[in-house]
Amino acid sequence: MYFSRLIVTLPKITSMRMVDNDRWAVLYCPKNGFANPKKRWEKVEKALNDNEISFDYIQSEASGSVERLVKMMINNGYKTIVIVGGDSALNDATNCLMQLSREERDTIALAVIPNGMMNDFAHFWNIDDDDIESTVKWIKERRIRKIDVGCVRYVNSDNERCRRYFLNCVNIGLVADIMDIRRRTRSFFGSRTLSFLFSFLLLTFRRLEYKMLLKVNDDEIDRNVMTVCIGNAPGYGMTPNAVPYNGLLDVSVVYNPVMTKLFEGIYLFVKGKFLNHRSVHPYRTREVTIYKAERAKVGIDGRLLNTPKGEFTVNVELEALNFIIP
């Protein structure tokens, strides 16, 4: 008989395992703005029970609770952590796991059942939002891929040295604005394309370029830039050739924010041909240094990052996490 139970907070025990290695820890993150999260969870729970999965689960109270709950799962000894959520929840789980030593991380595998406003990292692996049954079956097969993780190193407003990790991308400039609005409007439109277009239209009367100074490989870019995307994965369409297992970051730098060219760029973005636009300048690198990005917002995996104070760098950590893939 397999059943679910709520995980309780237990003190960290390092000398013995507290749960079986085969038992999953499942963190359910309800979609913001949706009225019936219970119904979605019932579908997930049924798929887990139908596949005879031994699991414990807990529901996050808010977006800020994910890291705390994942840390609790790690301390309780779980070796398979399944996030039922979107890119932001995966980002929080990744940042929690990256606080561990590599030896500790190598004993834990992360998986996702898509349930967010934005599920682009799941979509990269062709994970279907609605086919929960198939997703649970392949998680059960435990096919692990070592994946790279991007890292932003910066100093915050309190002069503290900080790190923030990402699976998808870092956006600097206009698209960070768009992604922020897109997150807040997706629940109204239901469609990622419509929410993106609406977000873009809201920003057409705002600043479309930012004075930036950055270095990519041997190229120093010192000019007005509309947006920069640094992708460990396809970057919401802006770094479509990036993959999280080659040890490199893809970078798209977009110049010349002329309105007619912007609409052409939106069309190519929707069609998945963003790099074909003449204003997009692509690079591939291990590290990017941003010396200056005046008044530009910075987004990380679709969520705004408190704007770094002064210079910051973005690089990649090779084969940093165990991720369960189809």
Image (cartoon, rainbow, N blue to C red):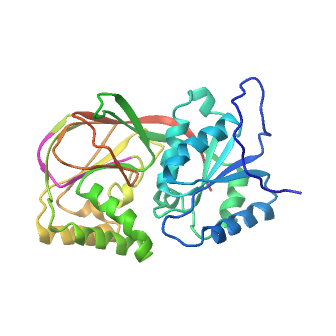
| Rendering quarter of residue 61 | bottom right
Residue at image coords 46%, 59%: 120
Which quadrant is home to the C terminus?
A: bottom right
Decide if residue 132 is on the left or right side of residue 265.
right
* Residue plotted at (31% across, 33% down): 154
Residue farthest toward the right in the current orientation of the protein: 1
Of residue 117 and residue 273, the one placed in the foreground of this image is 117
**Residue 168 position in % (x across, y down):** 42, 50
For residue 199, above or below residue 285: below
Residue drawn 35% across and 75% down? 194
Q: Is residue 48 above or below residue 97?
A: below
Image point (28%, 69%), residue name: 268
Q: Is residue 131 above or below residue 292?
A: below
Q: Nearer the viewer, residue 132 or 231?
A: 132
Query: What main secondary structure does the magenta stretch of the protein show?
Result: strand
Q: Is residue 203 above or below residue 221?
A: below
Residue 165 percent coordinates (x, y): 43, 40
Q: As drawn, is 235 to the left or to the right of 276? A: right
In the image, residue 229 lies in the stretch drawn in magenta: yes
Query: What is the x, y in percent for residue 119?
Result: 49, 61
Q: Which residues are magenta?
A: 221-231
The reply to whether residue 107 is visible in this rendering is: yes
Whether residue 307 sits left or right of residue 28 in the image: it is left
The quadrant of the rendering that contains the N terminus is bottom right
136 in the magenta segment = no
Q: How many marks?
A: 0
Answer yes or no: is residue 108 visible.
Answer: no
The quadrant where residue 189 appears:
bottom left
Q: Nearer the viewer, residue 291 or 10?
A: 10
The spot of residue 190 in percent (x, y) is 45, 75
